[in-house]
Image: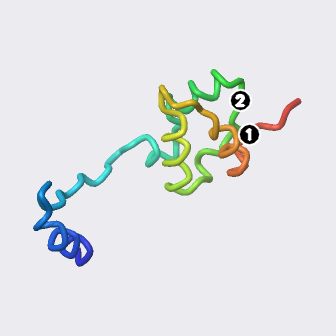
Amino acid sequence: EALRQHLQARTSALSAGQAKDLPRPDAEPWQQADQLPEVLAASCAQLGLEIRSGGWAELDELQRFALVKLSHPGHEHRNLPRALAEFGLLAEEP
């Protein structure tokens, strides 16, 4: 709350106006540890990647957020395979 008030005070004199409050995320795909988001599943399928079973639930919220953002349509997905590997999510090849 103190940071919010500080930012509003610091931006009140700006020509664009005072900083506005952002809505708090609620029930976003990255907040659902029990279900792999469809957008991520689709991007992995497009790239021929398979996420290991149970891996999504093991990630923290920030890691899940990053993967959802990297998998959005229109994104090049250049860093998605690297992030999946870094987070230990790629399924072992047979």
Apparent side of residue 63 relative to residue 21 in the rendered image (left or right): right
Residue at (53% x, 48% y) in the render: 66
Identify whether 93 is placed above or below 82: above
Query: Quarter of the image containing the C terminus?
Result: top right
Along the line of sight, which residue is nearer the eye, 54 or 19?
19
Q: What element carries label 2?
A: loop
Q: Earlier in the sequence, mark 1 or mark 2?
A: 2
Query: Quarter of the image containing the N terminus?
Result: bottom left
User: Looking at the rendered structure, which numbered label has been put on residue 49?
Assistant: 2
Where residue 93 sits in the image (x, y, percent)? Answer: 85, 32
Along the line of sight, which residue is nearer the eye, 94 or 74?
74
Where residue 58 sits in the image (x, y, percent)? Answer: 62, 53
Where residue 57 sits in the image (x, y, percent)? Answer: 58, 48
**Tag 1–tag 2 contact (CB < 8 Å):** yes
Distance in Å between CA atoms under marks 1 and 2 = 7 Å
Q: Is mark 1 on a helix, strand or loop?
A: loop
Apparent side of residue 72 relative to residue 50 in the rendered image (left or right): left
Q: Residues within 10 Å of mark 1 (few under 14, many from 20)?
A: some
Identify whether 79 is placed above or below 23: above
Residue at (32% x, 48% y) in the render: 26
Disc 2 marks a residue whose amino acid type is Leu
Label 1: which residue?
90
Apparent side of residue 87 relative to residue 15 in the rendered image (left or right): right
Q: Which residue lies most toward the front here?
A: 15
Residue at (44% x, 48% y) in the render: 31
Apparent side of residue 62 relative to residue 10 in the rendered image (left or right): right
Q: Residues within 10 Å of mark 2 (few under 14, many from 20)?
A: some
How did the renderer colour the structure?
A: rainbow
